[in-house]
Image (cartoon, helix red, strand yellow):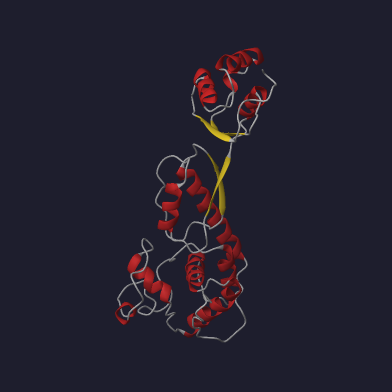
Amino acid sequence: EYTAPGPLPTERHIVVERGEGTRSIARDLVDAGVIRYDWTFLAALRVRDVHGQLKAGEYAFLPGTSLRDAIDKMVAGDTVVRRITLAEGLTVAEVLRRVGEAEGLTGDPPAVAEGRLLPDTYHYVWGESRAAVIERMRKAMDAALATVWESRPEDMPLATPDELLTLASIVEKETGVASERPRVAAVFLNRLRRGMKLQSDPTVIYAQTRGERPQDGPITRSDLQAEDPYNTYHVAGLPPGPIANPGLASLQAVVAPAETDDLYFVADGTGG
Protein backbone atom coordinates (compact mmCIF):
# COMPACT_ATOMS: atom_id res chain seq x y z
CA GLU A 1 0.00 0.00 0.00
CA TYR A 2 2.94 2.30 0.74
CA THR A 3 4.54 2.02 -2.69
CA ALA A 4 1.56 1.04 -4.86
CA PRO A 5 -0.03 3.58 -7.24
CA GLY A 6 -2.64 5.64 -5.43
CA PRO A 7 -6.33 5.98 -6.37
CA LEU A 8 -6.14 9.52 -7.76
CA PRO A 9 -7.53 9.57 -11.35
CA THR A 10 -6.68 13.20 -12.22
CA GLU A 11 -4.35 15.86 -10.86
CA ARG A 12 -5.52 17.50 -7.64
CA HIS A 13 -4.18 20.39 -5.60
CA ILE A 14 -4.23 20.23 -1.81
CA VAL A 15 -3.38 23.08 0.55
CA VAL A 16 -1.68 22.21 3.82
CA GLU A 17 -2.28 25.08 6.20
CA ARG A 18 0.43 26.30 8.52
CA GLY A 19 0.11 24.47 11.86
CA GLU A 20 -2.28 21.84 10.47
CA GLY A 21 -1.99 18.50 12.26
CA THR A 22 -1.12 15.21 10.58
CA ARG A 23 -4.55 13.68 11.21
CA SER A 24 -6.21 16.63 9.50
CA ILE A 25 -3.78 16.36 6.57
CA ALA A 26 -4.53 12.64 6.30
CA ARG A 27 -8.28 13.32 6.13
CA ASP A 28 -7.73 15.98 3.45
CA LEU A 29 -5.73 13.52 1.35
CA VAL A 30 -8.38 10.82 1.69
CA ASP A 31 -11.21 13.26 0.89
CA ALA A 32 -9.33 14.42 -2.21
CA GLY A 33 -8.76 10.83 -3.34
CA VAL A 34 -4.96 11.05 -3.18
CA ILE A 35 -4.66 8.13 -0.73
CA ARG A 36 -7.04 5.34 0.23
CA TYR A 37 -6.75 5.30 4.05
CA ASP A 38 -5.76 7.86 6.64
CA TRP A 39 -4.30 5.19 8.95
CA THR A 40 -1.72 4.07 6.36
CA PHE A 41 -0.57 7.68 5.99
CA LEU A 42 -0.24 8.09 9.77
CA ALA A 43 1.51 4.73 10.10
CA ALA A 44 3.99 5.63 7.38
CA LEU A 45 4.76 8.95 9.08
CA ARG A 46 5.40 7.11 12.34
CA VAL A 47 7.64 4.46 10.78
CA ARG A 48 9.63 7.12 8.92
CA ASP A 49 9.64 9.43 11.98
CA VAL A 50 8.69 12.50 9.93
CA HIS A 51 5.61 13.68 11.86
CA GLY A 52 6.95 17.18 12.33
CA GLN A 53 8.53 17.54 8.89
CA LEU A 54 5.47 18.05 6.68
CA LYS A 55 5.64 21.58 5.31
CA ALA A 56 2.74 23.93 4.72
CA GLY A 57 1.81 25.03 1.23
CA GLU A 58 -0.04 24.07 -1.92
CA TYR A 59 0.77 20.66 -3.41
CA ALA A 60 -0.03 19.24 -6.84
CA PHE A 61 -0.59 15.47 -6.79
CA LEU A 62 -0.46 13.68 -10.13
CA PRO A 63 -2.71 10.72 -11.03
CA GLY A 64 -1.62 7.53 -9.30
CA THR A 65 0.67 9.26 -6.78
CA SER A 66 1.75 6.64 -4.25
CA LEU A 67 1.57 7.14 -0.50
CA ARG A 68 5.38 7.23 -0.37
CA ASP A 69 5.59 9.89 -3.08
CA ALA A 70 2.92 12.00 -1.41
CA ILE A 71 4.85 11.99 1.86
CA ASP A 72 8.15 12.65 0.08
CA LYS A 73 6.61 15.68 -1.64
CA MET A 74 5.36 17.21 1.62
CA VAL A 75 8.56 16.49 3.55
CA ALA A 76 10.60 18.14 0.76
CA GLY A 77 8.23 21.11 0.62
CA ASP A 78 7.79 20.60 -3.12
CA THR A 79 4.96 23.12 -3.32
CA VAL A 80 3.24 24.62 -6.35
CA VAL A 81 4.90 27.81 -7.62
CA ARG A 82 2.29 30.23 -8.89
CA ARG A 83 2.92 33.24 -11.09
CA ILE A 84 1.46 36.65 -11.77
CA THR A 85 2.38 38.58 -14.92
CA LEU A 86 2.16 42.36 -15.08
CA ALA A 87 2.11 43.97 -18.51
CA GLU A 88 4.03 47.15 -19.22
CA GLY A 89 2.04 50.34 -18.78
CA LEU A 90 -0.31 49.27 -16.01
CA THR A 91 -0.86 51.86 -13.31
CA VAL A 92 -0.18 51.08 -9.67
CA ALA A 93 -3.93 50.96 -9.02
CA GLU A 94 -4.33 48.32 -11.73
CA VAL A 95 -1.39 46.29 -10.39
CA LEU A 96 -2.73 46.37 -6.84
CA ARG A 97 -6.12 45.16 -8.06
CA ARG A 98 -4.52 42.22 -9.87
CA VAL A 99 -2.37 41.30 -6.90
CA GLY A 100 -5.42 41.64 -4.67
CA GLU A 101 -7.32 39.17 -6.87
CA ALA A 102 -4.44 36.66 -7.12
CA GLU A 103 -5.48 33.31 -5.62
CA GLY A 104 -3.46 32.07 -2.67
CA LEU A 105 -1.96 35.36 -1.49
CA THR A 106 -2.78 36.74 1.96
CA GLY A 107 -3.27 40.18 3.44
CA ASP A 108 -3.88 43.49 1.74
CA PRO A 109 -1.48 45.01 -0.80
CA PRO A 110 0.37 48.06 0.55
CA ALA A 111 0.20 51.57 -0.89
CA VAL A 112 2.89 52.30 -3.48
CA ALA A 113 3.82 55.45 -5.38
CA GLU A 114 2.91 55.50 -9.07
CA GLY A 115 5.48 54.00 -11.42
CA ARG A 116 7.51 52.21 -8.76
CA LEU A 117 6.65 48.59 -9.74
CA LEU A 118 8.55 46.83 -12.54
CA PRO A 119 6.35 44.96 -15.05
CA ASP A 120 7.46 41.32 -15.23
CA THR A 121 6.39 37.80 -14.28
CA TYR A 122 6.64 37.15 -10.54
CA HIS A 123 6.42 33.79 -8.77
CA TYR A 124 4.84 33.11 -5.41
CA VAL A 125 3.63 30.24 -3.27
CA TRP A 126 0.29 29.70 -1.58
CA GLY A 127 0.04 31.63 1.68
CA GLU A 128 2.63 34.26 0.79
CA SER A 129 1.66 37.83 1.63
CA ARG A 130 0.66 40.38 -0.98
CA ALA A 131 2.97 42.84 0.70
CA ALA A 132 5.95 40.55 0.03
CA VAL A 133 5.08 40.20 -3.66
CA ILE A 134 4.63 43.96 -4.06
CA GLU A 135 7.97 44.53 -2.31
CA ARG A 136 9.70 42.29 -4.87
CA MET A 137 8.16 44.34 -7.66
CA ARG A 138 9.30 47.57 -6.02
CA LYS A 139 12.86 46.35 -5.46
CA ALA A 140 13.01 45.13 -9.07
CA MET A 141 12.09 48.62 -10.32
CA ASP A 142 14.62 50.25 -8.00
CA ALA A 143 17.36 47.98 -9.33
CA ALA A 144 16.38 48.44 -13.00
CA LEU A 145 16.12 52.21 -12.65
CA ALA A 146 19.52 52.46 -10.95
CA THR A 147 21.18 50.37 -13.66
CA VAL A 148 19.61 52.33 -16.53
CA TRP A 149 20.40 55.68 -14.87
CA GLU A 150 24.09 54.75 -14.72
CA SER A 151 24.10 54.25 -18.50
CA ARG A 152 22.61 57.67 -19.34
CA PRO A 153 24.39 60.02 -21.74
CA GLU A 154 25.89 63.21 -20.32
CA ASP A 155 23.72 65.53 -22.41
CA MET A 156 20.39 64.01 -21.41
CA PRO A 157 18.01 66.79 -20.24
CA LEU A 158 16.91 64.84 -17.15
CA ALA A 159 18.32 65.65 -13.72
CA THR A 160 17.29 62.66 -11.60
CA PRO A 161 16.33 58.98 -11.83
CA ASP A 162 12.77 60.01 -10.94
CA GLU A 163 12.62 62.21 -14.03
CA LEU A 164 13.86 59.29 -16.11
CA LEU A 165 11.12 57.11 -14.64
CA THR A 166 8.49 59.76 -15.36
CA LEU A 167 9.48 60.19 -19.00
CA ALA A 168 9.75 56.41 -19.49
CA SER A 169 6.17 56.04 -18.24
CA ILE A 170 4.99 58.55 -20.86
CA VAL A 171 6.90 56.72 -23.61
CA GLU A 172 5.32 53.45 -22.41
CA LYS A 173 1.80 54.81 -22.73
CA GLU A 174 2.36 56.56 -26.08
CA THR A 175 3.04 53.47 -28.23
CA GLY A 176 2.34 49.76 -28.10
CA VAL A 177 5.02 49.06 -30.72
CA ALA A 178 8.34 48.15 -29.10
CA SER A 179 10.47 49.30 -32.01
CA GLU A 180 9.00 52.81 -31.81
CA ARG A 181 9.96 53.52 -28.21
CA PRO A 182 13.43 54.99 -28.93
CA ARG A 183 11.95 57.35 -31.53
CA VAL A 184 9.09 58.43 -29.27
CA ALA A 185 11.60 59.00 -26.48
CA ALA A 186 13.71 61.11 -28.86
CA VAL A 187 10.73 63.35 -29.68
CA PHE A 188 10.08 64.09 -26.02
CA LEU A 189 13.77 64.64 -25.24
CA ASN A 190 14.03 67.01 -28.21
CA ARG A 191 11.02 68.93 -26.92
CA LEU A 192 12.51 69.18 -23.44
CA ARG A 193 15.77 70.55 -24.85
CA ARG A 194 13.87 73.22 -26.79
CA GLY A 195 11.60 74.19 -23.93
CA MET A 196 8.51 72.94 -25.77
CA LYS A 197 5.55 71.43 -23.94
CA LEU A 198 5.40 67.63 -24.19
CA GLN A 199 1.70 67.65 -25.14
CA SER A 200 1.24 63.96 -24.41
CA ASP A 201 -2.34 62.67 -24.51
CA PRO A 202 -1.73 59.91 -21.91
CA THR A 203 -0.82 62.62 -19.37
CA VAL A 204 -4.17 64.30 -20.06
CA ILE A 205 -5.92 61.02 -19.31
CA TYR A 206 -3.91 60.50 -16.12
CA ALA A 207 -4.78 64.04 -15.03
CA GLN A 208 -8.43 62.99 -15.09
CA THR A 209 -8.23 59.44 -13.77
CA ARG A 210 -5.02 59.26 -11.71
CA GLY A 211 -4.75 55.76 -13.16
CA GLU A 212 -7.66 54.43 -11.11
CA ARG A 213 -10.24 54.01 -13.88
CA PRO A 214 -10.55 54.02 -17.69
CA GLN A 215 -10.91 57.26 -19.59
CA ASP A 216 -14.54 58.29 -20.15
CA GLY A 217 -14.74 58.76 -23.90
CA PRO A 218 -12.30 60.58 -26.20
CA ILE A 219 -10.16 63.49 -25.07
CA THR A 220 -11.91 66.84 -25.57
CA ARG A 221 -10.61 70.36 -26.07
CA SER A 222 -11.59 71.22 -22.50
CA ASP A 223 -9.54 68.22 -21.30
CA LEU A 224 -6.47 69.61 -23.06
CA GLN A 225 -7.00 72.96 -21.38
CA ALA A 226 -7.57 71.57 -17.88
CA GLU A 227 -5.33 73.09 -15.23
CA ASP A 228 -3.67 70.05 -13.73
CA PRO A 229 0.03 69.39 -12.99
CA TYR A 230 -0.15 66.12 -14.97
CA ASN A 231 -1.60 67.77 -18.07
CA THR A 232 1.45 68.38 -20.29
CA TYR A 233 -0.66 70.50 -22.64
CA HIS A 234 -1.08 72.89 -19.72
CA VAL A 235 2.28 72.68 -17.90
CA ALA A 236 5.77 72.95 -19.31
CA GLY A 237 8.29 70.15 -18.82
CA LEU A 238 7.60 66.85 -17.10
CA PRO A 239 4.58 66.13 -14.91
CA PRO A 240 5.28 65.75 -11.17
CA GLY A 241 5.63 61.97 -11.41
CA PRO A 242 5.08 58.85 -13.52
CA ILE A 243 1.71 58.10 -15.08
CA ALA A 244 2.16 54.29 -15.16
CA ASN A 245 4.70 51.54 -14.52
CA PRO A 246 7.12 51.50 -17.47
CA GLY A 247 8.89 48.35 -18.56
CA LEU A 248 12.64 47.96 -18.83
CA ALA A 249 12.56 48.61 -22.61
CA SER A 250 10.98 52.04 -22.12
CA LEU A 251 13.53 52.95 -19.45
CA GLN A 252 16.30 51.98 -21.84
CA ALA A 253 14.69 53.90 -24.72
CA VAL A 254 14.97 57.14 -22.76
CA VAL A 255 18.74 56.77 -22.24
CA ALA A 256 19.32 55.39 -25.75
CA PRO A 257 16.88 57.34 -27.95
CA ALA A 258 16.87 57.30 -31.72
CA GLU A 259 19.11 59.85 -33.43
CA THR A 260 16.55 62.22 -34.93
CA ASP A 261 15.45 65.86 -34.88
CA ASP A 262 11.77 64.84 -34.85
CA LEU A 263 9.48 67.01 -32.74
CA TYR A 264 6.10 65.45 -33.62
CA PHE A 265 4.43 62.11 -34.20
CA VAL A 266 0.88 61.04 -34.95
CA ALA A 267 -1.01 57.80 -34.35
CA ASP A 268 -1.25 55.59 -37.44
CA GLY A 269 -4.51 53.92 -36.41
CA THR A 270 -2.99 50.49 -35.81
CA GLY A 271 -1.53 51.05 -32.34
CA GLY A 272 1.69 52.70 -33.56
Pick the quarter of the image with the N terminus: top right
* Location of residue 22 in the rendering, given as x and y in whole percent from the top left corner: 53, 19
Q: How many numbered badges does the structure rendering display? A: 0
Camera-nearest residue between 137 and 160:
137
**Along the horizontal axis of the image, is 76 left or right of 98?**
right
The image quarter in which residue 216 lies: bottom left
- Above or below, comparing residue 60 to residue 116 in the picture: above
The image quarter in which residue 229 lies: bottom left
* Location of residue 14 in the rendering, given as x and y in whole percent from the top left corner: 53, 32
The structure residue drawn at horizontal position 57% and vertical position 79%, both measured from the top left corner, is 183
* Location of residue 63 in the rendering, given as x and y in whole percent from the top left corner: 63, 33
- Above or below, comparing residue 194 to residue 66 in the picture: below
**Along the horizontal axis of the image, is 36 left or right of 159?**
right
Camera-nearest residue between 75 and 2:
2
Camera-nearest residue between 150 and 222:
222
| Extreme-right residue of the structure | 3
* Location of residue 173 in the rendering, given as x and y in whole percent from the top left corner: 48, 70
**Along the horizontal axis of the image, is 65 left or right of 175?**
right
